[in-house]
Amino acid sequence: MSLHAPLVEDAPLVEDAPPVKAARRPLADAGWTLTGPVTPPHPLPWLGSRRLPTPVAFGLLASLMVSFLAASSAPTPLYSTYQAAWGFTPITTTMVFGVYALAVLAALLTFGKLSDHVGRRPILITAALLQAVAMIVFSTAGGVPELLLARIIQGLATGAAAGAIGAALLDLNPTRGTIANAVAAPAGTGTGSLLAGLLVQYLPAPTHTVYYVLLTIFVVQAVGVVLMHETVTKRPGALASLAPEFTIPSAARRPMLAAAPALVAAWALAGLYGALGPALVRSVTGSQNLLLGGLSLFALAASGALTVLLTRGAGPRSVMTYGGFALLVGVGLTLVSVSGGGSTLGFFLGTVIAGTGFGAGFQGAIRTVVPTAAAHERAGLLSVVYSISYLAMGLPAVIAGFLVVHDGGLLRTAREYGAGVMILAALSLLGLARRDKAAAA
């Protein structure tokens, strides 16, 4: 079914009435079902009973994840522009990057389970509009304080939405939803970096245009969410769910223990490229082209997204094993290229190989953990997964910024950071081997 199919008449879903027995209604497309309570008409009279078909809603949700992550990486090619205009140091660059990750983490821990209680749609509409506000702050920023404010708003919106989007994808199609959760994050990260690099390098108003484009996208997506069915039944306990906690359902604890090292290694690498990637590219190539600055993160994330698609039929354990080895090889090649006189080809080849490890590690972790959760636990569990990921991405990046200024400069910091990622990848492989040995005993 085309993602541009017209709206169809369907039984609307309840949002305020007491929950009734869930209905599963297969669509013409095999494998697609919509699970949710049948409900009276939506309170907006002009909307009536018209709703997006399930495959279209699924595509909209996936696009939300892509655009949220694209917006998070959009400032990456602009850091050198901001630095030249406002005269800040690499520490500030990594703080701007890191404060986003910490805001995401705070929102995940606070709002991560809220959509399990109030529904997915209210969270997603609010988050999309908050992202639009962040784009306005970015486009009007006149200094570092506004940049930090925009990143905080952006992080809060992304953190609030991440669990809700992922859970809604699983609500609509558990099999495809698992894959979409794994592919959307790297696809969005790469898309935002490349799009920003292109717009910044070749169009006027470099610090405005990319944000205007994203602002338009978020407004359109918010309207699209209004047209969606709600995918989960409301449950009591919304206020209690706001208490920050890091809770993993009992069935997911052992799988999470196995997946955590792969998550940390993959997202720590993403943090390196998100915070210092453009500076490394300038150092290796000697070019000031802003598109090249965005291209490094795009190469990492796009190869990761492609790997998710190509390995979706393989077992999660095999995928995570490949991810660990690819991180070791790719990061090692990248470090050799950075240290050996600056090989541009070696740098990008290593980045692509490491990117396949990033995608495989993240997908293997998602597919290991998420299927163990019940429907009412999905948003909370995904929030824990993303909390680990963003903490691994943000904290090392901030430390790296400090080291660039106070402990030997960019290349030395990149080598130390890369060595740390390789150690994490090796620990992930060791943990998988020990689990296999224990299972065989």
Image: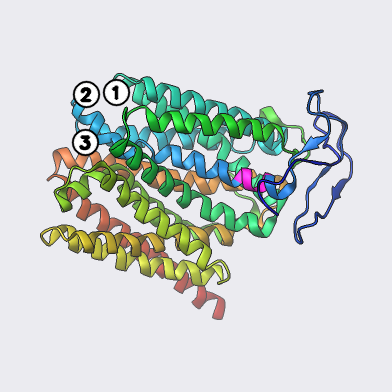
Cβ–Cβ under 8 Å for marks 3 and 1:
no
**Horizontal relation, residue 367 to residue 72: left or right:** right
Q: Distance between the residues labelled 1 and 2?
A: 8 Å
Query: Closer to the N terminus: mark 3 or mark 1?
Result: 3
Q: Label 1: how many residues lie within 10 Å, few (<14), some (14-19) or many (20+)?
A: some
Q: Nearer the viewer, mark 3 or mark 2?
A: 2
| Residue labelled with disc 2 | 86
Residue 161 in the image, given as x and y percentages of width and height = 57, 37
Residue 60 magenta-highlighted: yes
Residue 70 in the image, given as x and y percentages of width and height = 45, 41
Quarter residue 150 falls in: top left
Q: Nearer the viewer, mark 1 or mark 2?
A: 2
Residue 194 in the image, given as x and y percentages of width and height = 37, 46
Q: Which colour scheme is used?
A: rainbow
Picture quarter with the C terminus: bottom right
Which residue is painted at 60% across and 48% down in the image? Answer: 381
Check the image and report above or below for 293 versus 183: above
| Residue labelled with disc 3 | 90
Residue 421 in the image, given as x and y percentages of width and height = 32, 57
Which residue is painted at 45% across and 70% down in the image? Answer: 321
| Residue labelled with disc 1 | 144
Q: How far apart are marks 3 and 2 (CA)?
A: 12 Å
Query: Closer to the N terminus: mark 1 or mark 2?
Result: 2
Magenta region: which residues? 57-61
**Horizontal relation, residue 279 to residue 375: left or right:** left
Amino acid carrying label 1: it is Val
Quarter residue 406 falls in: top left
Amino acid carrying label 3: it is Pro
